[in-house]
Structures are given as structure tokens and as C-alpha cells.
């Protein structure tokens, strides 16, 4: 159980003693895939901007006492009308070690702060892959990982609330 009087983390990511609360040990491409299913026809059909659908997922797995592998998955599908132009997917991961962090801060650090560290690198790789395949670079807007995390918590609470009502 965490100490109810624990001080919140400092805005610079350190605890009250100035020790880092999270260290990035490594970052790496875990998986990268690019498909151009209708090439070469898709390369000659580029009249305007494609319709692009983006999917985002974040996973965290504990790999040691205070170390976690956090994986950010970004998948983008570009289409022009009914025709698929490209499908690109990256799983970009990092190994993060947490300092003396109160238990209630662990999930936000893993699902908000860690993906914020990973996103710029994954975004650059996706932009390069799409550009290198003959399309305009796909420049993803920054992602609100805090909002995604809060939506996930609300959905989980709603599911648990529905399950509890079904048991009553």
C-alpha cells in the first residue's frame, strides 16, 4: 500500500529528493511493416490527400523488479476512395526503470509518460517509411496519451460497473 502522504512528482520528473522517477534504458523498433497492396497503380493514383485511419495501442509488461517494457503500436491505413494505398504499422518499444514511485503513479507513468517519450521516434519512422514508399510523408499530430488513458479507465470502470450490476 502506498503512503497517503507521498509527495506528488515534480514537473521535471524527479521525486522530492531530486532522483529521477523514470529512466529510459533503451528504445527500439520491435516490429515494422509496410504494405503497398496495389502498387504500382496506387503510386499513379495520387490525385489528392489520402484518407488515413490511425490506430494506437500502448502495452506495458514488467520485465524486472522496477523495469518495464512499454510498447507503442501505431497503425495507419491510407486509402483513396475504395482503393488501399498503404498500410504501415510499427511497434516501437522502450525499457523503462522506475525509481521510488508510489504505486498510484506507476500506471500513469507507464501509459502516459513512457509513450510520450516513444512517440516522436515512432512518428519519424512512420513518416520516413511512407515517404520512402513513394507517398507524401505521413505526419502524425501529437497524441493526447493522458486523454487516451483516462478514456480507457472510464471504459474499464463502466464494464466493471455493468458486471457488478449483473451480479446483483
Image: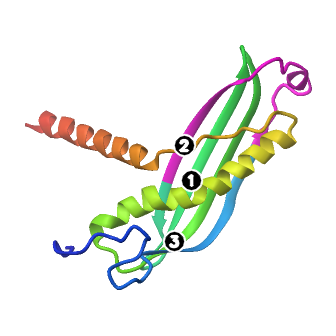
Where in the figure is residue 15, as x and y percent of width and height? 36, 78
* Circle 3 residue: 96
Where in the figure is residue 72, as x and y percent of width and height? 56, 53
Q: Residue 36 is drawn in which quadrant? A: top right
Q: Quadrant of the N terminus?
A: bottom left
> What is the C-alpha distance between the residues marked 2 and 3?
20 Å
* Circle 2 residue: 56
Discs 2, 3 touching: Cβ within 8 Å: no
Identify the residue at image location x=52%, y=46%.
57
Asked if the stretch drawn in magenta spans residue 55, the answer is yes
Q: Image check: 58 left or right of 139?
A: left
> What is the C-alpha distance between the residues marked 1 and 3?
13 Å
Asked if the stretch drawn in magenta spans residue 17, the answer is no
* Circle 1 residue: 72
What's the mark number on residue 9?
Answer: none
Q: Quadrant of the C terminus?
A: top left
Tell me which segment is drawn in magenta. 34-58
**Residue at the extreme top:** 81
Query: Does dot 3 land on a helix, a strand or a loop?
Result: strand
Identify the residue at image location x=56%, y=70%.
95
Where in the figure is residue 151, as x and y percent of width and height? 35, 41
Label 2 crowd bin: few (<14), some (14–19), many (20+), radius 10 Å: some
Q: Image check: 73 left or right of 98?
A: right
Discs 1, 2 touching: Cβ within 8 Å: yes
Amino acid at each position: 500500500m502506498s503512503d497517503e502522504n507521498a509527495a506528488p512528482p515534480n514537473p521535471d520528473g524527479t521525486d522530492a529528493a531530486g532522483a529521477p522517477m523514470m529512466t529510459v534504458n533503451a528504445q527500439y523498433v520491435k516490429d515494422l511493416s509496410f504494405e503497398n497492396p496495389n502498387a504500382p497503380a496506387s503510386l499513379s493514383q495520387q490525385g489528392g490527400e489520402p484518407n488515413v485511419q490511425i490506430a494506437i495501442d500502448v502495452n506495458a509488461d514488467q520485465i524486472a523488479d522496477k523495469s518495464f517494457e512499454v510498447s507503442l503500436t501505431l497503425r495507419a491505413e491510407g486509402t483513396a476512395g475504395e482503393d488501399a494505398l498503404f498500410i504501415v504499422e510499427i511497434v516501437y518499444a522502450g525499457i523503462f526503470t522506475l525509481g521510488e514511485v508510489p504505486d498510484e503513479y506507476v500506471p500513469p507513468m507507464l501509459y502516459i509518460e513512457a509513450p510520450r517519450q516513444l512517440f516522436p521516434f515512432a512518428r519519424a519512422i512512420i513518416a520516413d517509411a511512407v515517404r520512402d514508399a513513394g507517398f507524401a510523408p505521413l505526419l502524425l499530430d501529437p497524441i493526447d496519451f493522458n486523454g487516451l488513458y483516462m478514456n480507457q479507465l472510464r471504459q474499464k470502470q463502466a464494464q466493471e460497473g455493468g458486471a457488478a450490476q449483473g451480479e446483483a
